[in-house]
Image (cartoon, rainbow, N blue to C red):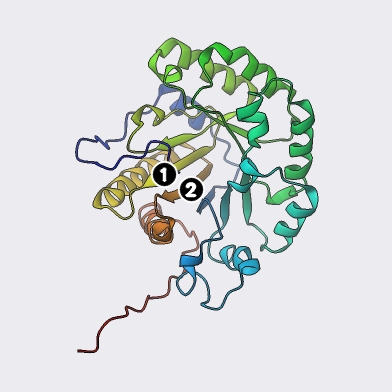
Amino acid sequence: MTFGKLEDLSDVDFTLPDDNPLTTNVISARDNAMPLQVCIGLPIWADKTWKGKLYPQNVKDSEFLYYYARQFNCIELNQSLYKMPDVKTMREWKDSCPDGFKFFPKFHQSISHERKLIGAAEPTAQFCEAVLSLGNSLGRVFLQLSPAYQPGQLKNLEKYLKSLPPELPVSVELRHEQWFADAGIWQETCSMLHSLGVGTVISDVAGRRDVLHMTLTSNHLMLRFMGNDLHPTDYTRADAWCDRIVGWINLGLKNIYVFIHCHNNSFAPELALYWIKKLNDSGNLRIQEPTLRPQSVQGSLF
C-alpha cells in the first residue's frame, strides 16, 4: 500500500486520536448473543519471500493460498480490485481454505474508481454474484473509493449503497481530505452509513493521519494498518491499537478485522505475529498465531 507512504517518520505524531462519540454509542449497543470474532491477516498470500519462513521452502505458487490459510484466518482480497472476480475462482479459493477462514474482497476498480459508482449496475451484479458465492467464507466487502471521490458525491454514494443486495456486508473507505476536514460533512456521512448498516474502514498510515478517524458506524472494526518495515514505531503503534481494541471489546465491540501491511511485505508476517501475540496477551484472546521459521543467514565461514 503506497497510500500515505512517508520516507521520513521523524515528524509524524502517531498518537491515536480520541474515539468519535458515535463509536461508543454503536459498540455499546451490545448484543450479548453475538460471539466475538477477531480476524487478523495480510493483504496478499503470494509473496515468494515468504518461502521457507511462512511457507515450506519448496511450495508451488499454486499452493500459496492453501498454506496461507493455515497460518492466518483471513485475507484482505486486493486481487478483486484489479481483476473482476468470478464464481468459479471464488469457489476454488474457498474450497482450498479451512472452515472459518474469511475473505474480505474489494470492489473492482471499474465500479469504484472508473465509473465512480455511476452507471455501474452490470459490473456490480457480476461482482456481487462472485463474492456472495463465498457463502459463510465471506467476511465483509471493501468499497475503497479513490482519493478524488469528494463529499459532493455523497448522495451518489448513498444511492449506490441502497442499490446493493441487502445480504452483502459492506464497509466504505473514504480518502479525499474534505470528508474529514469538515466536521459537519463527516457527521452527515457517518449518520448515513450508520442508518444503512454500512461500516467504515479506518486506515493507519504515516502520511495521512486524517484517515485515522476512529469512527465506527457498525459493530465492525475494519482496520488497515501500514507498518514501516519493522521500524520501532510499528510496535508502539501496535501496542496502542491493541489497548484501544481491548477497551472497545469491553464496551461491546464484536467484530474485529485487522489487515497488516508493510511497504516491503516480506516483513508483514512478523508484524502480524506481533499484533496477534499482543492481542492474545492483553485481551485474553485465542487468535491462532502463525509459525514463522527462522531464516538462515548466508555469509563467510571465516
Name the image quarter holding residue 107.
Answer: top right
Task: Identify the mark nearer the N-term, 2 or 1.
Answer: 1
In the displayed structure, would residue 19 be above or below residue 83? above
Q: Which residue is labeled 1 in the image?
A: 225
Q: Position of residue 206 (x, y in %)?
A: 32, 38
Q: Tell me the amino acid under the disc marked 1.
A: Phe
* Element assignment for label 2: strand
Q: Are marks 2 and 1 in contact (CB under 8 Å)?
A: yes
Q: Report whether residue 1 is seen.
A: yes
Q: Position of residue 276 (x, y in %)?
A: 42, 57
Q: Position of residue 56 (x, y in %)?
A: 53, 76
In the displayed structure, would residue 114 be above or below residue 204? above
How many C-alpha atoms fall within 10 Å of the one at disc 2: few (<14), some, or many (≥20)? Answer: many
In the displayed structure, would residue 171 be above or below residue 192? below
Name the image quarter holding residue 89.
Answer: bottom right
For this rendering, which residue is in front, 185 or 36? 185
Q: Which mark is residue 259?
A: 2
